[in-house]
DNA sequence: ATCATCGCTGTAATCGATTCCACGGCTCTG
DNA sequence: CAGAGCCGTGGAATCGATTACAGCGATGAT
């Protein structure tokens, strides 16, 4: 590999001058500049980012640790994060935790070893002492989507409260009364929060949320299937199942089909997190959509604010209900939401 | 950040000794070893990967450049790649080309600047002089899924020829005769190859593949939609549409629905690349499944072989047909494939 | 007793960049 | 015309690790 020394030799100047040209430092003569540029071109020289990082103590790289790459919601988020980071001159390294805390810790550690400038995390289930340590140590850090209570870093997320209220109103208008929820892991903030918002929305319609109508899932399709089977075996099964994420909704759909029931005639289905595929399922699934693009962009901006010494801010954006056909035929009025 | 010097001071030894302990070099006294380990522990020291990479000229990192992260096929591939790499002691940095050659080049370049040890690429449409240069320069490199003709690096991919023959036989058995294909970009090897295999399979049944039944797509959903609209507008529309990837199949499904037609009664649909969602569409889609896990693992192994000085080999694995209901009711015999 | 050998250790060079500091030459000012 | 100031430049220190080499004491062989 050609180094800055080779360029210097070729251009007949010192390495200092080459470096100055490359970093567009003002005090370089036009003559030296052209010679250096010519040499760079002739040799196809590219600066060694590793050496540069060692010296400057910055890598212009952000780490993104997400809980599950196979979940289209996170894939989309990752895409937007990379896009915004690139626009701001940063690269992104993604770590996939697969919803496993120890894998999450592994990625955080290797990311830190590589001296990334900042860390974007959507924490998996379970508490991680490492995460609090990292935050306390002053590593620039931002939580996105999910967060860890007690760890003092900015949070960028969507608030589903209103959308869940809209959903319940929609279900109520369709005459559905027995509503059940497949919750996410209790230890994730999003898991917990969605159940609470659901319970609250039900209360507003004077409906109860009995414990048997709360299923414990883990954000994976399989858990949605299992929980739904249990719901269907109940003496009085629910009229609608609301899954706290898209994967569990798919599992629920499986279970419902396997039981020989039809959606929405026999039972309704709704999900948190909208994904392109929901348009193509049978029937298309009513879902709560997060502003993923805005979320990803805002998270990167907040993180870069910290990295570059500005003061960041937590951001909460509203989610919105997208009515399709999985809970019953919407009225034309409701369909306009689509 | 604490450095190796701090550890040395704390343990009362030189940095050389600390380094030797960390790299489990034999000639360190047990006494020194315990003191160093204690110091490492007390200080929570972690070696600076940047400095280490500069000195040793290896990053233990692989780059993976894929054409579209939003495509579940590539997401899954990326997951397996990371998994196998981790097992072999490497990290992976993913670059998403979004099917744009210039973005692909951007990622290749930044990856190279970071001095990754090897590069895994699934090249996007269009030829990239950069890619040939990189290969010629001797950077360890492996193509996965797609490849670039004329660039001499190992290729790890699935061969769909047999599966496509199975598919055509299946369609023929169902009485379908007018079969159309939505091709990928001609410049991608997979795009080209699938059309040829399809044409050949048709010939075996004495069927022709007229030009109007070959639509030009770009592996994105929208193109599938457009091409299908054109198919449907034909005086004699095809009886089955075969999409060369999953996203275009979804677009096709949209177009068919929009035209008020039913799958499979009015028209059949099949896709290359199987994804979990195809089980849940209406109807479930018959597809050709690639052994993604094996592909990812084999690609990493081949790349690491090059990196570590062993001789790698190209790998071709068979794809297989998964019959569902989107082309007509399969006989029980065929369904066993599912 | 002497010298070679071995095990352990530290000093210092090195990787490829950035950047502080000093220096030479020039212009400008008084 | 002397001194101040500026511009462009190069030498050398530095970042945090690894590793070649040399030195040191203890041991064993002759």
Image (spheres, coloured by chain):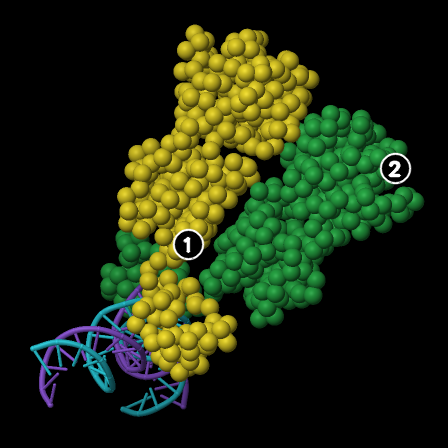
Chain colours: A yellow, B green, C cyan, D purple
Q: Residue at x 37, y 78 (%)?
A: A32
Who is closer to the viewer here, B209 or B49? B209
Q: Chain of mark 2?
A: B
Residue A76 image point, x, y percent: 52, 40
Mark 2 Cα-neighbour bin, 10 Å: few <14, some 14–19, many ≥20: some
SS class of the residue under badge 2? loop
x%, y% of residue A271? 53, 25
Q: x, y (%) of residue B292?
A: 65, 46
The residue that appears at 80% across and 26% down in the rendered structure is: B265
Relative horizontal placement of residue D20, taking residue A75 as reference (left or right): left
In this rendering, the answer to whether B29 lies above or below B288 is: below
Q: Is residue A176 above or below residue B6?
A: above
Give the SS element for disc 1: loop
A180 sits to left or right of B22: right
Residue B330 lies in quadrant: top right
The residue lying furthest to the right in this view is: B206
Question: Which residue position is annotated with label 1?
Answer: A89
What residue do we see at 59% from left, 24% from top?
A285
Mark 1–mark 2 distance (CA, rounded to whole Å): 54 Å
Task: Judge by depth and name the residue closer to the eye, A232 or A178.
Answer: A178
Name the residue beneath numbered marker 2: B177
Residue B22 appears in the rendering: no
In the picture, the disc for residue B276 is: none
User: Where residue B328 sits in the image (x, y, percent)?
Assistant: 81, 29
């Amino acid at each position: 590999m050609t180094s800055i020394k080779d360029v210097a030799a070729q251009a007949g100047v010192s390495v200092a001058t080459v470096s100055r040209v490359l970093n567009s430092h003002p005090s370089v003569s036009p003559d030296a500049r052209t010679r250096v540029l010519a040499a760079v071109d002739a040799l196809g020289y590219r600066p060694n980012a590793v050496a540069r990082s060692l010296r400057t103590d910055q890598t212009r790289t952000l780490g993104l640790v997400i809980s599950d790459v196979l979940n289209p919601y996170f894939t989309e988020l990752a895409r937007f994060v990379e896009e915004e980071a690139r626009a701001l001159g940063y690269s992104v390294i993604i770590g996939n935790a697969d919803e496993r805390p120890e894998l999450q810790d592994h990625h955080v550690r290797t990311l830190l070893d590589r001296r990334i400038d900042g860390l974007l995390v959507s924490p998996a289930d379970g508490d991680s002492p490492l995460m609090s340590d990292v935050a306390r140590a002053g590593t620039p850090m931002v939580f996105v989507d999910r967060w860890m209570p007690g760890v003092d870093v900015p949070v960028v997320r969507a608030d589903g409260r209103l959308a869940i209220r809209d959903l319940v109103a929609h279900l109520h208008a369709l005459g559905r009364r027995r509503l059940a929820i497949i919750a996410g892991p209790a230890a994730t903030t999003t898991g917990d929060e969605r159940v609470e918002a659901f319970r609250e929305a039900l209360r507003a319609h004077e409906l109860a949320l009995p414990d048997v109508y709360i299923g414990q899932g883990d954000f994976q399709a399989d858990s949605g299937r299992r929980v739904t089977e249990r719901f269907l075996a109940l003496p009085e099964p629910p009229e609608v199942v609301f899954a706290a994420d898209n994967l569990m909704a798919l599992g629920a759909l499986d279970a419902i089909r396997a039981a020989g029931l039809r959606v929405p005639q026999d039972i309704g289905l709704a999900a948190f997190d909208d994904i392109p595929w929901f348009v193509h399922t049978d029937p298309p699934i009513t879902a709560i959509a997060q502003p993923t693009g805005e979320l990803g962009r805002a998270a990167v901006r907040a993180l870069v604010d910290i990295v570059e010494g500005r003061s960041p801010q937590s951001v909460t954006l509203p989610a919105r209900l997208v009515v399709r056909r999985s809970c019953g035929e919407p009225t034309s009025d409701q369909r306009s939401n689509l």
